[in-house]
Amino acid sequence: THKRISRSVYDYCIDTKIVDSSLIAKWKKPGYERLCSTYVINPSNYKFGTTSICRVPLNDRSVEAKMAQDPTTGCRGCGSGKGAGPSNIFGNKYGQNLAAVQVAREKRLEDLAKRK
């Protein structure tokens, strides 16, 4: 884990089902660091026993499929690896804004800690 929250908060979130523990477990495995949902990797959810288009890295997609997104989750590309997908996998401004706020908070806390 990235040690961004305390263990007690993490356990609370799992116990109260605020977070998906199986999704978090997948994030810890190589190749699944950006996984949007466990739904997209379940072959029984898709025709021909495959996974969602969002799991295919952008550089491996045809020109027509570059802008494709999963119809269920809305994910545009959660394939892991360098250049595998967009930085904001859901393609909306809210994900980017929340991430920017979190990064700014962490930087501010680091700056405050350095001053002490």
Image (cartoon, rainbow, N blue to C red):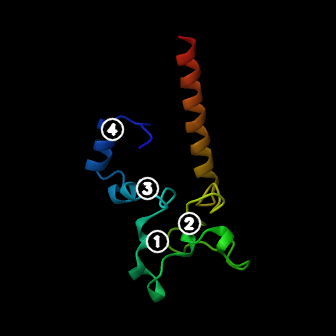
Q: Are marks 3 and 2 in contact (CB under 8 Å)?
A: no
Closer to us: mark 4 or mark 3? 3
**Circle 4 Cα neighbour tier, 10 Å, few/some/many (<14 / 14–19 / ≥20):** few
Asked if labels 2 and 1 touch by Cβ distance under 8 angstroms, the answer is: yes
Kind of element beneath mark 1: helix
Query: CA gap, disc 1 to disc 2?
Result: 9 Å
Residue 108, compared with residue 73, is above or below; it is above
> Mark 3 sits on what residue?
27
Residue identifier under label 4? 9
Identify the element where label 2 is drawn: loop
**Residue 44, image x, y percentages:** 39, 82
65 relative to 23, above or below: below
Locate residue 110, reporting x and y percent: 55, 24
CB within 8 Å, label 4 to label 3: no
Q: In 3D space, how far apart are the residues under numbered discs 2 and 4 (Cα atoms)?
A: 27 Å
Q: What's the amino acid at mark 2?
A: Cys
Q: From the viewer's perspective, is residue 13 above or below residue 6?
A: below
Q: Is 28 on the left-hand or right-hand side of 63? A: left
**Helix, strand or loop at mark 4:** helix
Across and down, in percent, residue 49 comes to 44, 85
Query: Label 1 vs label 3: CA separation?
Result: 13 Å
State the residue position of label 1.
40
| Disc 1 + disc 3, Cβ < 8 Å | no
The nearer-to-camera label among 3 and 2 is 3
Q: Which callout, 4 or 3, points at the residue further toward the start of the chain?
A: 4
Q: Secondary structure at mark 3?
A: helix
Task: Count residues near mark 2 (Cα–Cα under 10 Å), then give few for <14, some for 14-19, many for 20+.
Answer: many
Of callouts 2 and 4, the N-terminal one? 4
